[in-house]
Image (tube, rainbow, N blue to C red):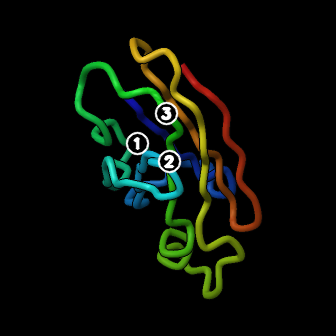
């Protein structure tokens, strides 16, 4: 499984309602795998079905622009964050958290 958790560190709370898209690289193109919005705890656990994932290069796209606009920021500096990562061990779960603020973001491989 691939899951994510988004925390708004400027407001000190989970980023609820943030749209996330998961894609898999196929040659020079990206194929959609899953899409959803974070829950009230900033979590999204429904991007992939349970079970092994195909190995490959995946990309999460986080819609920061709409989220920050909904929070009252008229013109967000970062309209989106794209996080690209490799899945090699298909028996593992991959958790990719994102920490956001209006003028920056950070990510890491979580557990």
Disc 3 to disc 1, how far (Cα)?
29 Å
13 to the left or right of 3: right
The residue pinned by badge 2 equals 14
* Helix, strand or loop for disc 3: strand
Identify which residue is drawn at 49% across, 54% down.
Answer: 15
Out of 99 and 21, give the one closest to the viewer. Answer: 21
Q: Quadrant of the N terminus?
A: top left
Q: Earlier in the sequence, mark 1 or mark 2?
A: 2
Disc 1 to disc 2, how far (Cα)?
5 Å
The residue pinned by badge 3 equals 56
The residue pinned by badge 1 equals 41
* Residue count near mark 3 (Cα–Cα under 10 Å), binned few <14, some 14–19, many ≥20: some
The reply to whether callout 1 and callout 2 are in contact (CB within 8 Å) is yes
Identify which residue is drawn at 43% across, 20% down.
Answer: 93
Extreme-front residue of the structure:
27
Which marked residue is nearer to the observer: mark 3 or mark 2? Answer: 3
Q: Earlier in the sequence, mark 3 or mark 2?
A: 2
42 to the left or right of 73: left
Is 11 situated above or below 54? below
* Residue count near mark 1 (Cα–Cα under 10 Å), binned few <14, some 14–19, many ≥20: some
* Residue count near mark 2 (Cα–Cα under 10 Å), binned few <14, some 14–19, many ≥20: many
* Helix, strand or loop for disc 1: loop
Q: Earlier in the sequence, mark 3 or mark 1?
A: 1
x then y, percent, for residue 111: 53, 19
């Amino acid at each position: 499984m691939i899951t994510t958790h988004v925390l708004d560190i400027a407001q000190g709370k989970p980023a609820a309602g943030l749209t996330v898209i998961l894609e898999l690289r196929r040659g020079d193109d990206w194929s959609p795998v899953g899409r959803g919005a974070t829950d009230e705890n900033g979590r999204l656990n429904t991007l992939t079905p349970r079970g092994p994932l195909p190995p490959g290069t995946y990309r999460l796209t986080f819609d920061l622009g709409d989220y920050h606009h909904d929070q009252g920021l008229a013109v967000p500096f970062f309209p989106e964050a794209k996080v690209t990562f490799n899945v090699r061990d298909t028996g593992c779960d991959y958790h990719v958290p994102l920490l956001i603020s209006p003028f920056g973001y950070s990510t890491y491989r979580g557990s």
